[in-house]
Image: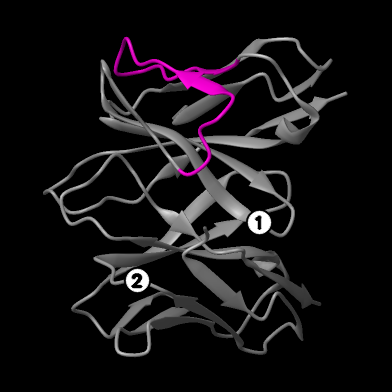
Amino acid sequence: NAGVTQTPKFQVLKTGQSMTLQCAQDMNHEYMSWYRQDPGMGLRLIHYSVGAGITDQGEVPNGYNVSRSTTEDFPLRLLSAAPSQTSVYFCASSSTGTGVRQPQHFGDGTRLSIL
Amino acid sequence: SQQGEEDPQALSIQEGENATMNCSYKTSINNLQWYRQNSGRGLVHLILIRSNEREKHSGRLRVTLDTSKKSSSLLITASRAADTASYFCATSRSRYNQGGKLIFGQGTELSVKP
């Protein structure tokens, strides 16, 4: 029962570096999302995808890119890391079920520090 | 901006007591969900209540929804030390799924002391 797998679990970057946070799910879910969690802010939606080849912006998309070439994978790219992007990043997936929203399944997060 | 606001921000109780957390939101919703997050882990779904429901139960959890007041509450009865976690409400405005666009509150940090 892998569920949603995020890698790496921890990462330290220097300002200006780029990197990709990986997310994979094995539940054949159509919907995948990326959130960031900051102290006192709850979770904020960065980008989401309704299926392979389709992505859209969430609440805080600036500085991040996504793509969805397969149902299973939804990588998040930081183009040029900034200290303001220090956060814990969560990937989530859900199915459509009967057309009413299904609960989201979360990975354990990637803790990212930008120096 | 955040849709939900949770109250209290932190709650400390003794094992066996009941814990009540509240969530208020700003716009109309299709459903409201509660999630739990243990320290250092991802969120785990607890319960979903639809906008046409007023109360829902799942084991020791009881959720109420008052759409006229735009508020929800989560009651955990007979709490255990293992219930220590952060609890988040999340709202969805879409009936037909718009890519997992849940809007989360800031969370309530619950501490249950043995």
Q: Which stretch is magenta?
A: A59-78
Residue farthest left in this picture: A98
Helix, strand or loop for the magenta stretch, by majority:
loop
Nearest the eye: B63 or A45: A45
| Residue drawn at the location 64% of the way across and 46% of the way down | A37
Q: Is residue B81 left or right of residue B43?
A: right
Query: Magenta includes A63?
Result: yes
Q: Quadrant of residue A55?
A: top left
* Residue A93 relative to residue B78: left or right: left
Name above or below for residue A63 compared with residue B72: above
Residue under circle 2? B27
Residue identifier under label 1: A41
Q: Which residue is depicted at the point 52% across and 61% down?
A: B2
Marked residue chain, label 2? B
**Which sits in the foreground, B57 or A98?**
A98
Can the viewer see residue A108 in this picture? no
Q: Position of residue B56 (x, y in %)?
A: 32, 79
Using the rendered image of the protein, determine whether residue B100 is visible from the camera's viewpoint.
Answer: yes
Query: What is the C-alpha distance between the residues marked 2 and 1?
Result: 19 Å
Q: Is residue B89 magenta?
A: no
Quarter the C terminus of chain B occupies: bottom right
Identify the residue at image location x=84%, y=15%: A14
| Dot 2 alpha-carbon crowd within 10 angstroms: few under 14, some 14 to 19, many 20 or more | few
Three-letter amino acid code at the position of disc 1: Met
